[in-house]
């Protein structure tokens, strides 16, 4: 696995500067909180989709977990006082997220979403008493994934961002789901176009314009939760991810 040169990428959306979609991503105020539990190996992978959710949803945070550390060390206090945490995971006793389910829960909710392989997510669940105390929920049946950057391991599997979008569609309304799905579509289409896998006219939002002559990257901070990973390796040792080449992600 080659290293990512983060000087070539936006530290907020992780896309190459020409493909950056930060200005097109809406910023939405929502009542439902979001906690993204991201496995360290997922953090800063350029094909990861989950990190896009905090760009859109104001009441959200990222917790990067490590397989070598007890997960509960980082999970203490991740949910605000007065809120009920629900875990998007098909665990024992999982309930289906539906409008009818939502009507029976008047308290503010925080959606906790693992962002890891199924194997790693299950291992984290076994190690974490905090996660096991949360109410597991699952998505209602829906259409197959349309937008993804990695081949689904099996039919019916969708990306993390699409899972968050569908859940928020129930918890917050269709306008939130549509906003998140638009960001996912833009991300996937721009990746595919940059690899030559999509014709320019197929991009719903158009081809990103070339960077102007003499352009310099704006000084943007990394998303909260990810900066320590980048900074720990130092500027000459960017965090491991996929290829830096525009056509090689």
Image: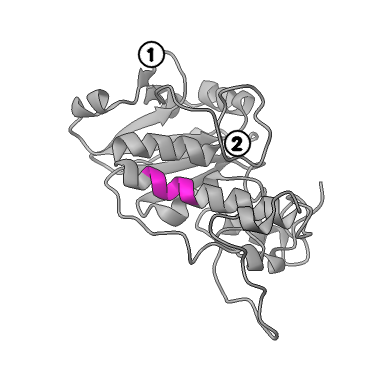
- Identify the disc placed on residue 177: none
Q: Nearer the viewer, residue 56 or 205?
A: 205
Per the rendered image, the range of residues in magenta is: 177-182
Assess whether residue 181 is covered by the magenta stretch: yes
Give me the residue at 24% from left, 29% from top: 102
Label 2 and label 1: CA atoms lie apart by 27 Å
Give me the residue at 35% from left, 41% from top: 79
Instruction: Give the main secondary structure of the magenta stretch.
Output: helix
Name the side, left or right, on which 160 lies relative to 208: left
Task: Please determine whether, in this image, residue 210 is positioned above or below residue 84.
Answer: below
Q: Position of residue 216 (x, y in %)?
A: 65, 81
Residue 61 appears in view: no
Give the image quarter of residue 209: bottom right
Give me the residue at 55% from left, 41% from top: 38
Q: Are marks 2 and 1 in contact (CB under 8 Å)?
A: no
Residue 177 appears in view: yes
- Identify the disc placed on residue 69: 2
Secondary structure category for the residue under label 1: loop
Give the mark nearer the N terminus: 2 vs 1.
2
Q: Nearer the viewer, residue 134 or 128?
A: 134
Name the side, left or right, on which 56 lies relative to 44: left
Residue furthest to the front in view is 201
Q: Position of residue 90 (x, y in %)?
A: 47, 20
Residue furthest to the bottom in view is 214
Task: Please determine whether, in this image, residue 176 is positioned above or below residue 167.
Answer: below
Name the side, left or right, on which 212 lies relative to 62: right
- Identify the disc placed on residue 93: 1
Give the image quarter of residue 12: bottom right
Residue furthest to the top in view is 92
């Amino acid at each position: 696995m080659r290293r990512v040169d983060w000087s070539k990428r936006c530290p907020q959306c992780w896309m190459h500067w020409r493909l950056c979609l930060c200005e097109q991503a809406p910023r939405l105020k929502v009542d439902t909180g979001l906690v993204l539990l991201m496995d360290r190996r997922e953090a800063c992978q350029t094909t990861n989709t989950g990190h896009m959710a905090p760009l859109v949803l104001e009441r959200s945070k990222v917790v990067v977990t490590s397989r070598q550390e007890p997960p509960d060390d980082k999970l203490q206090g991740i949910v605000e006082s007065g809120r009920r945490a629900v875990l998007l995971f098909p665990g024992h006793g999982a309930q289906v997220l539906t409008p009818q389910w939502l009507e029976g829960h008047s308290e503010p909710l925080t959606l906790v979403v693992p962002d890891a392989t199924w194997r790693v997510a299950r291992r984290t669940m076994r190690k974490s008493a905090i996660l096991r105390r949360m109410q597991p929920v699952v998505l209602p049946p829906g259409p197959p994934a349309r937008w993804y950057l990695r081949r689904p391991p099996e039919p019916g599997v969708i990306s993390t961002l699409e899972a968050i979008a569908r859940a928020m569609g129930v918890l917050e309304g269709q306008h939130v789901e549509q906003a998140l799905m638009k960001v996912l579509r833009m991300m996937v289409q721009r990746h595919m176009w940059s690899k030559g896998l999509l014709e320019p006219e197929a991009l719903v939002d158009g081809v990103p314009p070339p960077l102007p002559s003499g352009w310099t990257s704006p000084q943007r901070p990394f998303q909260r939760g990810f900066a320590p990973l980048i900074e720990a390796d130092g500027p000459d040792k960017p965090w491991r991810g996929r290829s830096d080449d525009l056509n090689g992600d």
